[in-house]
Amino acid sequence: MCDCCSAEGRDASYRCGPQSKMVPARLYKVFVGRVASVKLCRLCDIHLFRSGETRFLAQNIQFAQTLVSSKSSSDGGMGLFD
């Protein structure tokens, strides 16, 4: 399931179809010195490309909060961050 859609409470399979593929994406500007690896549905991937990371996260606040909580829980461990 799409990380952004699941954080925002949207049904990615309804929005993109049941056979849609998840696209791996990396967010570079979210945190200093860290890269966040996420899986996005086709629509979220297009939205991220068109709006950029800053606007994408500003429009998807729950997803941004999920990234922050994942960063704090994965101190030194393998999680969303490489």
Image: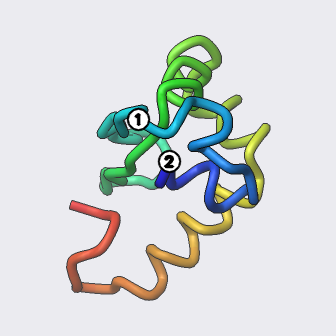
Question: Does 2 sit left or right of 14 as displayed?
Answer: left
> Tag 2: Cα neighbours inside 10 Å, few (<14), some, or many (≥20)?
some
Residue 2 screen position, x and y as percent: 50, 49
Number of the label disc, if any, that sits on residue 19: 1
Image x and y of residue 46, in percent:
53, 18
| Residue wearing tag 2 | 30
Front position in the image: 81 or 10: 10
Q: Amino acid at mark 2?
A: Val
Q: Is residue 32 left or right of residue 81?
A: right
Is residue 75 or residue 23 the one in the foreground? Answer: 23
Q: CA distance from mark 1 to mark 2?
A: 30 Å
Q: Quadrant of residue 56?
A: top right
Observer-nearest of 60 and 11: 11
Residue 11: give x, y in percent of width and height: 68, 50
> Residue drawn 57% across and 43% down?
13
**Viewer-proximal residue, 31 or 37?**
37
The residue sitting at 33% across, 40% down in the picture is 26
In the image, residue 27 above or below residue 38: above
Q: Quadrant of residue 6?
A: bottom right
